[in-house]
Image (cartoon, grey):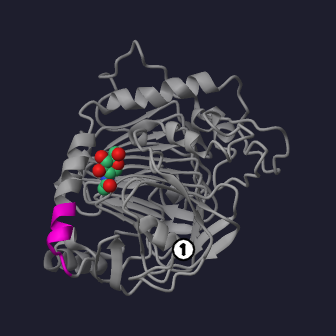
Amino acid sequence: MEDAKPMLLVLSLLVVAILPTLRANIADFDEVWKKRAEDAKKASLEAYDPHPERVTQNVNEEVHEALEGDDGKRRNLKKYNGPCTATNPIDRCWRCDQDWASNRKKLADCALGFGRKATGGKDGEIYVVTDPSDDSLLDPKPGTLRYAVLQPQPLWIIFAHNMMIKLSQELMVTSNKTIDGRGANVHIANGGQITLQFVRNVIIHGLHVHDNKAGNGGMIRDSFDHFGLRTRSDGDGISLFGATDVWIDHISMWNCQDGLIDAIMASTAITISNCHFTHHNEVLLFGGSDTYSDDKVMQVTLAFNHFGKGLVQRMPRIRWGFVHVVNNDYTHWLMYAIGGSQQPTVISQGNRFVAPPSLFAKEVTKRGYTPESVWKSWNWRSEGDLLLNGAFFVESGSPITNLDTKDMIPAKPGSFVARLTRFAGALACVKGKPC
Ligand SMILES: *[C@@H]1O[C@H](CO)[C@@H](O)[C@H](O)[C@H]1NC(C)=O
């Protein structure tokens, strides 16, 4: 589809040229934003790991320990009613504890992969959201989600009851926050996106995020002591912009206006795990610009996610950075699953790729606008992936040899993936029972 839209490409290049992307959505790039941008840049350079292979090993070893058996090649579509079985190492860290509600912060120790240092609001108090409204962008009411995420101190944010939150514009989440939807059925839907701009250390867990729309912007508070004029927001599900140490886990996401999750402007140290994505065209975008080479520091782990019904492309589409795609279940795509440009690195291990019926969409991979003479040196590797229904992964670059083989235990084979991802998406956790 991208190839079929040359006019759009030209237009977006023009927009990039006119409006420096660094300022995106910030109409008044004042001293506060300048300082935040500088701090965020430092944070991303600090978090960037010059030896990312070691982090991929960390996930691989844990997966190996968490599994005992093979569950076969099909997704079990029946609703699961048995005892708690945490099927992957991230879940195993917390899920089967029946006292999870009194040990919520245990979750902060459970991330793996590039986002593993995210502890969110672990050092802060619990804050209970009681009010689903979002009526004031400058002076949000205590008890609302917007009020909670703007507080200057670390906070572990939970929800008093089930709620549908329609954000009137994008939600500006600040550093050192956890948004923890466990125990309530929480939907962030039909309104503004969740934005993490120039912030560090955020965990988002257990929400349904869907049908978000572009927002017109306006005067929006972006921290306890600062607000400013913001321009239009894209209508992503979750937007990371110069964000570092972010873990997004067990989120169900569908049908937003732009991407479900976009990570741009040197966002790094990110893990996206246990999410269930459905009904969306451009699912995950990592790196939004062909000219912004600072995105080379971008390092993302995608683990135990289910890319399900009604998806089209970009799972992810990556520029410049490094993505470890491990033990995800790709059961639906219409165009391709993993795409990229600007020599990104894609390490795909132990995923299951089930190609769609169309003969023209069997290829898992897609390199945009690049001749083979150029992309043949990009490192895109597939190891232990289960390729079904004619799916094929076009590798390039050289085999992964720079791994420390003495620690390196391969990801589980793709045939384990249905089991590893069985509980992807927001969980219906009940107090006093294992999740
Ligand atoms: C977040 O927490 C860390 C560790 O407590 C602290 O050093 C840092 O200043 C906090 N960041 C912000 C923006 O409050």
Residue 175 position within the rendered picture, expressed as x and y whole percent measured from the top left: 36, 57
Q: Residue at x 48, y 20 (%)?
A: 409
Badge 1 density bin: few <14, some 14–19, many ≥20, Cα 10 Å: many
Q: Residue at x 46, y 79 (%)?
A: 140
Viewport quadrant of the N terminus: bottom left
Residue 24 position within the rendered picture, expressed as x and y whole percent measured from the top left: 25, 74
Residue 117 position within the rendered picture, expressed as x and y whole percent measured from the top left: 40, 39
Is residue 268 visible in the rendered structure shown here?
A: no
Residue 332 position within the rendered picture, expressed as x and y whole percent measured from the top left: 60, 56
Q: Which residues are magenta?
A: 28-36
Left or right of 209 on screen, residue 200: left
Is residue 42 visible in the rendered structure shown here?
A: yes
Check if residue 383 falls in the magenta segment. no
Say which of 200 and 152 sits in front.
152
The answer as to whether callout 1 falls within 8 Å of ligand 1 is no
Occupied quadrant, residue 403: top left
Left or right of 75 on screen, residue 158: left
Q: Is residue 365 above or below residue 196?
A: above
Left or right of 365 on screen, residue 319: left
Q: Which residue in the protein does label 1 denote? A: 144
Chief secondary structure of the magenta span?
A: helix
Q: Residue at x 17, y 75 (%)?
A: 29
Secondary structure state at the residue bearing disc 1: loop
Q: Amino acid at mark 1?
A: Thr
